[in-house]
Image: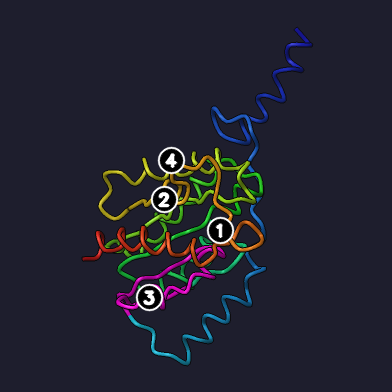
Amino acid sequence: MIHTIRVLLPVMAMLSFGGVGVLTAQVEDPDPLRFAEAIEAFAAFDSHNTVPRNAIVFVGSSSIRFWPTAERFPGLTVINRGFGGSHISDVNHYAKETVIKYAPKLVVHYAGDNDVAAGKSPEQVFEDYREFTEQVLAELPRTHILFVGLKPSVLRWDSWPQMMEVNRLVREYSEGKLNLHYVDTGEPMLGSSSEPDPAQFVADGLHLSELGYDIWTEVVGRAIADIVE
């Protein structure tokens, strides 16, 4: 009996920490204050420029930051508020400064890639995204949110199964909801290949090359058109 109790106690502790039915503990969120200067730079830019209302805000990690969205979507009014290395928890922390203050008609969201690489479970990543949608829609109930599916990359190919699970959870969560949308990047990028194409990435095998952004601009552009036009 004593041996049985000793075995059960760690299991019960993990269940208590990670939630019912989850045996893996949650990974601690990184400190969002590491992006304080980047957020201050956004505010400084806004203080010297006319900020359009009813625009499309692109927010998230470096895949957003490095995307020349104004050039790629010349017919749209866009605001790019990507800050590289961010987790969804960071985007949530700065949602007022990077999204809500602009009262956009659409938010294009790409984050979660770094979260999975840091060891966060698909469920934890999804719950952070759900928190983001609830936070934004509580303030802006008419705003639409488009989740850009996590991408398959050369550097993080081993994490692709976990990323696909994040994508599945977000896709199912978004189905049937008027303001929530999902667009897949996996199939367009992989095509019939069994592994990512290095030509779609710069030398680090993670960040998109011009070819990679060609694919994203096409598939995300179609999704945007379906939502706002």
Location of mark 3 (residue): 78
> Which numbered disc, 4 or 2, marks the residue that appears first in the sequence?
4
Looking at the rendered image, the quarter that the N terminus falls into is top right
Q: How many marks?
A: 4
177 relative position to 82: left or right:
left
- Above/below status of 170 relative to 53: above
Mark nearer the viewer, 4 or 2: 2
Q: Which mark is residue 169?
A: 4
- Above/below status of 87 relative to 45: above
Identify the residue shown where x is 26% and y is 44%: 176
Identify the residue shown where x is 44% and y is 42%: 192
Location of mark 1 (residue): 199
Q: Position of residue 68 (x, y in %)?
A: 47, 74
> Which numbered disc, 3 or 1, marks the residue that appears first in the sequence?
3
As for residue 73 lying within the magenta part, the answer is yes
Q: Nearer the viewer, residue 134 or 66?
A: 66
42 relative position to 10: left or right:
left
Is disc 4 surrounded by few (<14), some (14 to 19) or many (20+) residues within 10 Å? some
Location of mark 2 (residue): 188
Please provide the residue range marked out in magenta: 53-80
Q: Are marks 4 and 3 in contact (CB under 8 Å)?
A: no
| Amino acid at pointer 3 | Val
Identify the residue shown where x is 44% and y is 49%: 130
